[in-house]
């Protein structure tokens, strides 16, 4: 009897132990069929009146004559009501992620306490090539913002330091790093702009270049010395630094160096230093490549370009204080992507450094107006990064066997403010907005009052042009006038979004107006808090254009 009770207790204990183990089996996303759409299967390739079938997170079929599986949930769109297009999910090749560093409180300044090195650490706080993107660093808000802009896959990169660490290739769905990891060790990231404070080394860019060279020399020597010892273990065994071991794949060709550059000189310096070690880095650009494009093209290095164009100079305010280089850059920046591609360099786009990734679309449209081929523009966000990242057999296109990563757009994607309706990641649907047929045409000038908790009532002016559902325009408040990132109509509701960076604040400013006749009221939010808004249309569209 006692033996029976003991056995029973052991079985219960084992069962309870098994019950708390995590279930590693993944939930099945299910089967879906999306019909009545135009499928843009790749840049320059499309199928009208198409059906796309998703099964277990993977595209099963796409085309005009696809049979809908009997077990599929059908998502039907009527082309007579709205033309909906499906595009491959966008891929961002460079998304910096803030990293917690053990040395945050010690910059190595003169007079400070000497830093205690952990075993295997390289003796400088700016050199941390062993760092990786971990679960607690998952940038949830940034991921959500990228999804809203149509991105489904990205490379997360360590943000700070000289040699910053290894990135992670991820999808951008829910569930954090565990549910979205594609490759945990993707590339090594660097920047020549990393310096220390005070008199400690390096406190200049020249010093940063010297430190980078020295680190590469040390890493290469360690790799060669240990390889020689493996061949002949009778000689003295060389010392081993774990941090330097993380750089060895660069010299064996098993990893890729990506360098963030701040200007043209930075780009050429990075190319020069890397060439000394027979490395061919990819360069995260700065938008001024046109300044010395012929010299840059000679390097043949891959460019990860931001679409970050300056606002038009306020000549009324600055009068003659605007420099010729500033005016030249304002004029030429939108042509930069097209010029770089025309030079023969391979180009992928990134949403960096926009605080709101959705701002990329307006600048992408501006670039196409200034000479960038639309198909090459789409390729720089889909097929090109997929090939560079080694996932072109599963991402960047709509094809059987590919990850079910795509976005649904009402109308065209390459417009100033595309109407993104849904983003699908690994076969899971993320509804961005449910659009109803427009019941209003709000174009014109609106005088607004924003009722805030901290600053009282603020007067603002909203200028709208175009036809619903997608409009463009400007927002003016406290003497600052900025373009709208988005203005969209659904039913009798107008939704507006503004890139907060243009007003000196992180994140986005959003608000809506429920409009009846010539008046509207609603609410909104900004990085500084929530607010109520009410307004009245004071000028018709023609009057707005005449005033402008």
Image (cartoon, rainbow, N blue to C red):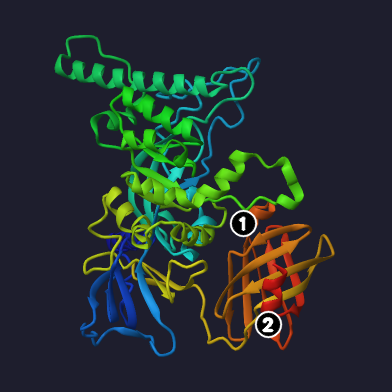
User: In terms of depth relative to the viewer, which is nearer, 308 or 336?
Assistant: 336
Q: Which mark is residue 125?
A: none
Residue 191 at least partly seen: no
> What is the residue that sits farthest to the left in this orientation?
231
Question: Which picture quadrant has residue 27?
Answer: bottom left
Q: Secondary structure at mark 1?
A: loop
Q: Indicate the position of residue 262 as horizontal and vertical percent values.
A: 51, 36
> What is the residue that sits farthest to the top in this orientation?
235
Image height of 427 relative to 22, above or below? below
**Which residue sits at x=34%, y=70%?**
427
**Crowding near pointer 2: few (<14 within 10 Å), some, many (20+)?**
some
> What is the residue that sits farthest to the right in this orientation?
456
Of callouts 1 and 2, the N-terminal one: 1
On-image quarter of the C terminus: bottom right
Which residue corresponds to mark 1?
Answer: 507
Image height of 517 relative to 330, above or below? below
User: In terms of depth relative to the viewer, which is nearer, 74 or 270?
Assistant: 270
C-alpha separation, residue under disc 1 versus residue under disc 2: 24 Å
**Which residue sits at x=44%, y=89%?**
81
Image height of 478 relative to 299, above or below? below
Question: Which picture quadrant has residue 4?
Answer: bottom left
Task: Answer with left or right where residue 281 lies relative to residue 414.
Answer: left
Q: Secondary structure at mark 2?
A: strand
User: In terms of depth relative to the viewer, which is nearer, 103 or 247?
Assistant: 247
Tell how many labels: 2
Q: Indicate the position of residue 43 as horizontal and vertical percent values.
A: 31, 64
**Which residue sits at x=31%, y=24%?**
277
Image height of 538 relative to 163, above or below? below
Question: Which picture quadrant has residue 225?
Answer: top left
Which residue corresponds to mark 2?
Answer: 514
């Amino acid at each position: 009897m006692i033996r029976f009770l003991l056995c029973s207790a052991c079985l219960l204990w084992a069962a309870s132990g098994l019950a708390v183990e995590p279930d590693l089996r993944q939930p099945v996303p299910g089967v879906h069929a999306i019909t009545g759409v135009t499928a843009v299967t790749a840049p320059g390739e499309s199928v009208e009146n198409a059906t796309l079938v998703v099964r277990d997170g993977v595209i099963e079929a796409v085309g005009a004559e696809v049979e809908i599986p009997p077990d599929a949930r059908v998502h039907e769109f009527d082309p007579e009501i709205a033309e909906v297009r499906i595009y491959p999910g966008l891929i961002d090749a460079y998304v910096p992620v803030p990293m917690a560093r053990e040395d945050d409180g010690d910059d190595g300044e003169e007079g400070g306490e000497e830093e205690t090195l952990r075993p295997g650490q390289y003796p400088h706080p700016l050199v941390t090539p062993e760092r990786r993107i971990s679960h607690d660093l998952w940038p949830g808000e940034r991921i959500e913002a990228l999804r809203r802009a149509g991105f489904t896959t990205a490379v997360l990169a360590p943000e700070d330091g000289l040699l910053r660490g290894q990135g992670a290739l991820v999808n951008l769905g829910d569930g954090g790093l565990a549910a979205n990891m594609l490759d945990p060790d993707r590339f090594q990231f660097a920047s020549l702009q990393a310096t220390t404070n005070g008199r400690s080394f390096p406190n200049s860019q020249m010093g940063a270049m010297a430190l980078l060279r020295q680190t590469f020399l040390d890493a290469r020597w360690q790799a060669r010395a240990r390889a020689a010892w493996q061949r002949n273990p009778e000689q003295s065994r060389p010392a081993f630094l774990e941090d330097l071991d993380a750089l060895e794949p660069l010299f064996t060709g098993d990893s890729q160096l990506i360098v963030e550059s701040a200007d043209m000189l930075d780009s050429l310096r990075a190319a020069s230093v890397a060439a000394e070690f027979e490395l061919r880095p990819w360069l995260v650009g700065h938008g001024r490549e046109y300044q010395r494009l012929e010299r840059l093209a000679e390097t043949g290095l891959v460019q990860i370009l931001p679409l970050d164009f300056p606002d038009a100079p306020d000549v009324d305010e600055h009068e003659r204080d605007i420099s010729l280089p500033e005016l030249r850059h304002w004029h030429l920046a939108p042509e930069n992507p097209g010029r770089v591609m025309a030079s023969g360099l391979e180009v992928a786009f990134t949403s960096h450094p926009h605080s709101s990734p959705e701002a990329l679309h307006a600048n992408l449209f501006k670039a196409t107006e200034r000479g960038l081929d639309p198909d090459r523009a789409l390729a720089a966000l889909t097929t090109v990064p997929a090939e560079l990242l080694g996932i072109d057999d599963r991402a960047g296109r709509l094809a059987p066997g590919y990850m079910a990563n795509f976005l649904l757009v009402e109308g065209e994607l390459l417009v100033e403010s595309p109407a993104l309706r849904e983003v699908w990641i690994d076969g899971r649907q993320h509804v961005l907005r449910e659009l109803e047929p427009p019941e209003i045409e709000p174009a014109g000038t609106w005088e607004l009052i924003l009722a805030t908790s901290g600053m009282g009532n603020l007067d603002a002016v909203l200028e709208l042009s175009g036809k619903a559902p997608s409009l463009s325009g400007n927002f003016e408040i406290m003497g600052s006038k900025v373009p709208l990132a988005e203005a969209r109509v659904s039913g009798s509701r107008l939704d507006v979004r503004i890139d907060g960076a243009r007003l000196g604040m992180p994140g986005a400013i959003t608000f809506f107006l429920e409009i009846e006749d010539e008046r509207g009221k609603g609410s909104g939010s900004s990085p500084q808090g929530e607010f109520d808004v009410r307004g009245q249309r004071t000028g018709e569209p023609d009057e707005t254009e005449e005033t402008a």
